[in-house]
Amino acid sequence: MKLSCTQENLAKGLATVGRAVAARSSLPVLSNILLATDNSRLKLSATNLEVGINCWIGANVEQEGSTTVPARLLTDLVNSLETERIDMELITRTQTLHLKSGRAEANIKGIDAQEFPIIMVPEEDSRVKIDADAMRQMINQVAFAASADDSRPVLTGVLVSVADGKITFAAADGYRCSVRSMDLEGAADRQMSVIVPARALQELARIAVEQDQPIEMLVDTNRNQVYFHMQNVDLVSQIVEGVFPDIRQIIPTTYNTRVHVDTTEFLKAVRSALIFARDSANVMRLQVVSHGEGEEGRLMVTASSPEHGDHASELDVTMEGKPIEIAFNGRYLMDVLGVIDTAQVLLEMRDPSSPGVIRPVGGADFVHIIMPMHIAH
């Protein structure tokens, strides 16, 4: 293998695939990045066996070949070099990669490319196309609600389903649930449902920032994998096996109190109160009271710390229904308010012991359910 490429392109490519490198593995090759020539381009690949990423960058290829080298070492080295041409040559006999850039040279000992797992995307036509920006927004509004606890693997994933010309993402961790739907062009007859690891989708959202073409999604049930194809990047993920909770049974259909509140002001109040709520399991009280005239009301956001004191914010709201006092996890409130981009948000509540519902006003097809916390009177 002998080729040259720019430092900038190589650094960007390594950053794209680097997050899929296995942090700890009994297989040393999984700590490496695969470098392989591919039709006058350089292909970079990394996998932790749950997620795999392929990335192609422009290169001047003189001699075909492939090898794998330690990911962190190569990334740190390339980032330290000047922004100019990098020449690479593989000494096949010793699997040593020789790099030269300007007056700097390095030799990196690698592992034969044949030991690296192949990350393949099948050439099938049954692909669903999704706008890259819309995909990123959907992931950001849902993936944070997935569980970080591996004892229930199904809840560490996001349910991705296509039906009736719509694509829906849903995630739940037992304390909250996020659901986002979007119309999908050219998918009226498509039906599918898979659970994708939230971590894989978060990597996809990170990569999608630089994409301006639609992302193609393809499910291979034989391999139990889902594929996302982009410009110069492919992401492959294992599918989580199991049955996802029925989302329709989780979303409340009635409420006794409904509040319209300014999203930015609400987020600001929650953020301030959370400083005091941190010492008491993030408990945050919301109290909705009427002004007594029409639909005008007040929302009080309060939190207290036995050690440090307390905090209260008062917000003007438009309300329907009865006054209520309810407590939520302030961290969860902050998470959901941070991914809503409409000027106002709806908060619907039935009683202090029932889940609350948060929706953007006039925004996307998005709903978030959050379980209440017990208030000791």
Image (cartoon, rainbow, N blue to C red):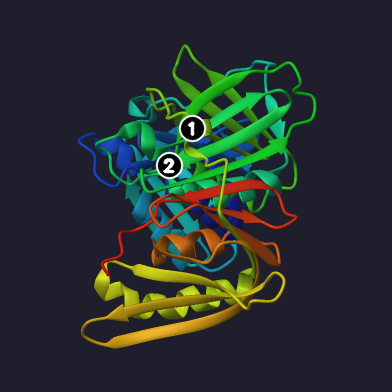
Q: Residue at x 64, y 76 (%)?
A: 292
Contact (Cβ within 8 Å) of mark 2 with mark 1: no
Q: Which residue is mark 1?
A: 249
Check disc 1 and give the amino acid type: Gln
Q: Residue at x 27, y 39 (%)?
A: 150
Q: Residue at x 30, y 36 (%)?
A: 29
Crowdedness of circle 1 by 10 Å Cα count: few (<14), some, many (20+)? few
Q: Which residue is mark 2?
A: 172
Q: Is residue 93 left or right of residue 123?
A: left
Examine the rendered structure and indicate whether residue 35 appears above or below residue 83. Answer: above
In x, y percent, where is residue 129?
A: 71, 31
- Spot the residue most to the right: 186
Q: Residue at x 52, y 58 (%)?
A: 336
- Spot the residue most to the top: 222
Quadrant of the image occupied by residue 280: bottom left
Examine the rendered structure and indicate whether residue 210 appears above or below residue 52. Answer: below
In x, y percent, where is residue 20?
A: 41, 43
Q: Is residue 30 left or right of residue 341?
A: left
Question: What is the count of numbered marks?
Answer: 2
Q: Nearer the viewer, residue 92 or 154?
A: 154
Quadrant of the image occupied by residue 12: bottom right
Examine the rendered structure and indicate whether residue 107 appears above or below residue 168. Answer: below
SS at mark 1 in the image: helix
- Of the 4 image quadrants, the one containing the C terminus is bottom left
Q: Nearer the viewer, residue 109 or 316?
A: 316
- Spot the residue most to the front: 292
Check disc 2 and give the amino acid type: Ala
Q: Nearer the viewer, residue 366 or 67?
A: 366
Does residue 152 appear in the picture of this structure? Answer: yes
Q: Is residue 355 left or right of residue 229?
A: left
